[in-house]
Image (cartoon, rainbow, N blue to C red):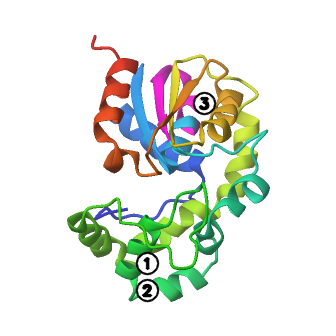
Amino acid sequence: MGDSTGRPAAYTKTVLAGYVHDLLDRIGARRDVRFVAHDFGVGVTYALAAQHRQQAGGLFLMDFPLVGENLSFATDVRPRSWHFSFNVQDPLAERLVTGRVGTFLDYFFRHSQISGSPQPGDDPPSPIPPRSIEEYTRVFSRPQVLRTGFGLYRTWSRDEEENKRLERVPLTVPVRLLAQDGLTDLMLPPVRDAAPGATGTDVAGAGHWLLEERPDRVVAEVDAFYAVR
């Protein structure tokens, strides 16, 4: 992603978690790491914590449907937004978006709330600043980065099966979930399949891009969850 290089062996979240685990291990962060994760980072963070339990001291998670025993990608997640179905089309998605990355990303940021698909004539303001869209357009115009972005979606069914296996041993570290307005009831129960003690709440008035839409609320929640040592 971004300006990084390399080709992971797979885009399953267990594989990607292995890279994060190795990086943390190399810098000496081998125990009680306090994780903050958004979107697919939630899937990676959960896979890391479930496989390397001593390394995780807590999980602060934001707006992601963690598929597994009681949440299915095919029936519960995929029907909720157009981009879930589009992004898994291989190689059609890349062929349609190549050369039109800025147009795709602008539409994606405006219309990627999983609480409902866009309606005809619906053109909400973008929650992402123009300078950020310019930077995302630059990096996603690199062919491998674009394929990686779509690749995160294309392993979701495999992630579901792997999470079912990992959930057999529940997490015991503190876990907190923030969800977009109105979706805690969807997102918190599957997190509790993985970590029965997890707590969570909606962020009123916010969509998926919590860090851009409600940064002060996110920072306050992180500070409250991870008290200063």
| Magenta-span inclusion, residue 50 | yes
Which amino acid type is marked by label 3?
Answer: Ala
Relative placement, left or right, of 96 versus 229 is: right
Q: Is residue 28 visible?
A: no
Magenta stretch, residue numbers? 47-62
Which amino acid type is marked by label 2?
Answer: Thr
Q: Which residue is mark 2?
A: 98
Q: Earlier in the sequence, mark 1 or mark 3?
A: 3
Q: Residue at x 38, y 89 (%)?
A: 99
Provide residue 168's location: percent of width, then percent of height: 76, 28
Q: Which residue is mark 3?
A: 50
The correct choice, above or below, for 69 with respect to 85 in the image is above
Q: Nearer the viewer, mark 2 or mark 1?
A: 1
Relative placement, left or right, of 113 versus 221 is: right
Locate residue 66: give its quadrant. top right
SS type, badge 1: helix
Q: Which residue is mark 1?
A: 104
Q: Residue at x 42, y 65 (%)?
A: 109
Mark number, residue 26: none
